[in-house]
Image (cartoon, helix red, strand yellow):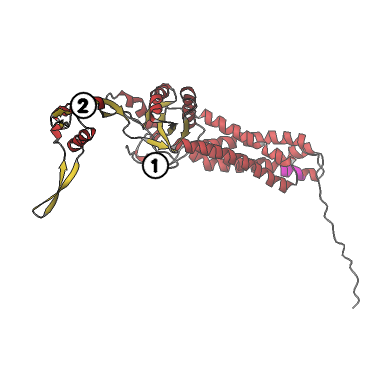
Amino acid sequence: SIYLSEPEDRKRSADEIYKNLSKVINQFTGVRASLSQPPTIGSRWGGPPVNFVIQAENYDKLVEVLPKFLDEANKDERLQFVDVNLKVNKPELMLTIDRDKAAKLGVSIEDIGRTLQIAYGGERMGYFLRDGKQYQVIGQLNREFRDQPSDLKSLFVKNNSGQLVQLESVVKLEEHAVPTSRFRYNRNVSATISAGLKPGFTLGDGNAAMKEIAARVLDNTFATEFSGQSRDFEESSSSLLFVFIFAILIIYLVLAAQFESFVDPFIIILTVPLALAGALISLWLFGMTINIFSQIGIIMLVGLVTKNAILIVEFANQKKASGLDKLEAVKESAVQRFRPILMTTMATVLGILPIALGMGAGSRISLGIAVVGGLLFSGFLTLFIVPAIYSYLSSKEATVVEEEKDEIEIKPVTV
C-alpha cells in the first residue's frame, strides 16, 4: 500500500498520482501489479472498484470459461488490471492405484495405502519421554526422500508371498494444476473477476462492460452478480433515482396544498429540468462524471431551484388578485423578484463554490460543479421560462376566498 502525504504537503492530487502510475506500472516486466484507490464511501480497503461474480454448476465448467472471460475483459477499453481470485496454478500430484496390476503381483490395496500413509502422511505413531519431556513419534520419510515424484522408486511393499514389490510398479502418477482456493457465493461455486478503470471511465462504465462480456461469453447455466463497490453502486443508483422522483413528488404535493392549486406547483416544478440540464452540461464541460456525489448534488437542486419559481408565482398571484391581467402580473413579478432571486442564488453559489473549486481536503468537486452549474443555469432561465409558462397555464383571474365577517351590533348605553 502507498500512503500519500497530506494534501497541503504535495503538489499533485491522489487522482493525478493514480493516473500517472497507471501509465507506467505495466512497464515493469516479471511483476504482476495492479492499482486501486480506496473508495470514498464504504470500506477503506475495498480493493479494485469493479467486482463481478460468476457462479457455475461445477468447478470444471467455471475453470473452462474463465480464460475466455479474462481475455475479453483485458481487451475492453474501459477496464485495466483485470484479475480473478480463482487461481488454477497450484501443482497437484494425483496417485492412482493400478488395481489390475496389483492383483497380478499379489499386492493388496490396503498394504499400498498403509505404505503411502507411513511414508508421506506424517502419522503420529506414539509418544516417548526424555528428560521429563514428552515427544511425539512421527512416521514419515525425511525431507530429502519425499520431495520428488521419483522418490516412489525407493518404496517397496510386500505381496501375499512375502516378496518386495516396487511401489512405483503398481501406481500411476498424474501431475496437473488445481485452484489454490475454492470459493462459493450463494452456495454456488464461484469466481470473482476484479478490475480497475481506465482514466475517463466511471464505475457505471465498468459494470456495463462486465455485463456485456458476460452476455457474449457465458451461457444460461451461469449466474452472475456484482459484489463490493460495484454492488453498492448498482444499489445506490436505483435508490437515488427513487429518491429523486420521490423528492419531486413530495415538493409538488406540499406546494399544491399551500397554493390550493395543481397548476401553480406544476409551473414551479418545471424549473427542475432546467437545473438538471445545467448540472449535466456543467459536468460535461469540466470533464466530470455522474457519480454518487454528482447525483446527490442533483437531488439537492430539486429543493434549491424551486424557491426562485415560488417567488415569481406567489407574487404574480398577489398582483393578479389585486386586479392586474395575468400577463402584466407575471411581468411585474419577474421584475420585482429579480433582486431577491439574484441574492439568494448568488449566496448559495458562493457558499458551494469552494467545493466546486476543490479547495481543502476531501472536497467533492463533482457535487459542487453540479450544484453551482444547475443553480446558475436555472436561475437565469427561470426569469424567462416561468413567466412564459405562467402566462399560458395560469387562470385569468385569481381565486379569492372572501371571509365571512361577523356583524356586531352596538347598542347605546345610558348612564
Q: Nearer the viewer, residue 5 or 241?
A: 241
Q: Secondary structure at mark 2?
A: helix
Mark 2 to mark 1 CA distance (whole Å): 55 Å
Whether residue 336 is visible, yes or no, is no
Q: Nearer the viewer, residue 300 or 227?
A: 227
Q: Which residue bears the numbered disc 2? A: 170
> Where residue 230 sits in the image (x, y, percent)?
46, 35
Q: Which quadrant of the view contains residue 104?
A: top left
Look at the picture and state if 103 lies above or below 258. Answer: above
Along the horizontal axis of the image, is 54 left or right of 393?
left
Q: Are marks 2 and 1 in contact (CB under 8 Å)?
A: no
Main SS of the magenta part reads: helix
Q: Which mark is residue 278?
A: none
Along the horizontal axis of the image, is 77 left or right of 262?
left
Q: Nearer the viewer, mark 2 or mark 1?
A: 2
> Where residue 98 sits in the image (x, y, percent)?
25, 26
| Residue range highlighted in magenta | 313-318
Q: Which residue bears the numbered disc 1? A: 44
Q: Nearer the viewer, residue 191 or 158?
A: 158
Q: Residue at x 82, y 41 (%)?
A: 397
Look at the picture and state if 161 lies above or below 41. Answer: above
* Quadrant for the N terminus in the image: top left
Residue 412 within the segment the image draws in magenta:
no
Q: Nearer the viewer, residue 49 or 71?
A: 71
> Where residue 373 sits in the image (x, y, percent)?
56, 34
Whether residue 396 is visible, yes or no, is yes
Q: Which quadrant of the view contains residue 163?
A: top left
Badge 2 local density, few (<14 within 10 Å), some, or many (20+)?
many
* Residue at the left extreme of this rendering: 131
Badge 1 local density, few (<14 within 10 Å), some, or many (20+)?
few
> Where residue 234 sits in the image (x, y, percent)?
51, 36
